[in-house]
Amino acid sequence: MHRPTSDLIESRRASVVIPSPTTAGRGISIARSSTSVRLRFLGAKETRLGKTGSQKRDVASTGLNSPAGRRRLLRRLLRLGEHVFAGIGLVLVLYHCGFDLSRMVSGSMSPTLQGTGRDDGDWVLSEKLSYRLRDPHRWELVEFTNTDGVQVMKRVVGLPGEAVSLKERQVAVNGAVAPRPASLREVEYWTYGNLYGGRSVECGGGYYVLGDDSKDSQDSRYEGPVSPDHIIGRPWLIVWPPSRIGFVNP
């Protein structure tokens, strides 16, 4: 059947303007889908921005200008102070129990220990542990308190139970010359005090001590043997001046 041209035109317009239900549904679905994607993207972006802002607020609230930051800094400083003072206390306890630092103010132990006064003598570190574990040995230096209550350092030449005398300016123990270390071969001992005239002195329960420069040394020749109770420690190391740093015992 022949249809009018106007009808065809209207029909085409209708087909163009009026979409099919299926197409319309897909269009609406696609539109909704794209809108939800955009919404989800925007929501995620806003969430990330929100987290960043909260992090900034947290950093600002924990900075040094905030009360919490100042409290945390104070706690750290107090902890550090506790560790420092604990370390200092430990060092002081160890020094008091195990060491003694003193200065030579005379030349009575020269050349081993040198000093002519309080301004130029050797600073000597003595350790107290050795003589808690063993007795002093012959030729060792000992630090002790003399009869005047003064701390002095001398060399042990006679042990408890021995008899000490001098022969040709050498130490004799029980009548026989005692061999000595090579470092002391040039040292000469003089027959002063209770050793004068070749006399012999019994050590008893003490230690007979002499100064290396025995021409001018207040030692056992004048004060007798040193009681073990008066011994403080063993001179160990010259720590000052730098040119004299070194161990003092043979």
Image: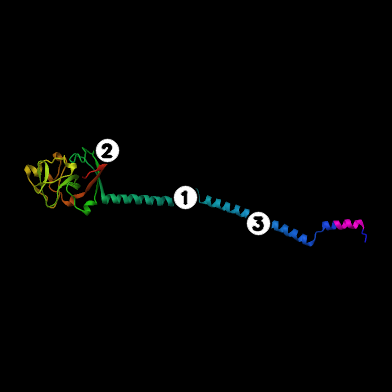
Q: Which mark is residue 216?
A: none
**As drawn, is 239 to the left or to the right of 71?**
left
**Residue 6 among magenta residues:** yes
The quadrant of the picture occupied by the N terminus is bottom right
Between 215 and 89, the residue placed more toward the observer is 215
**Residue 200: x, y in percent?**
8, 47
Query: The disc labelled 2 sits on which kind of residue?
Result: Ser
Residue stretch rendered in magenta on the structure: 4-12
Q: Would residue 76 be seen by someone viewing this image from the given angle?
A: yes
Which-is-in-front pick, marks 2 and 1? Answer: 2
What kind of element bears circle 2?
A: helix
Gap in angstroms between the C-alphas marked 2 and 1: 50 Å
Badge 2 vs badge 1, beta-carbon distance below 8 Å: no
Left or right, 57 with reference to 124: right
Estimate the x, y position of residue 98 in percent, counting from the top left.
26, 50
According to the picture, the residue beneath numbered tag 3 turns out to be 40
Q: Pinpoint residue 144: horizontal percent, then vertical percent.
A: 19, 47
Residue at numbered disc 1:
70
Residue 243 circle label: 2
Q: Amino acid at mark 1?
A: Arg
Estimate the x, y position of residue 2 in percent, counting from the top left.
Answer: 93, 59
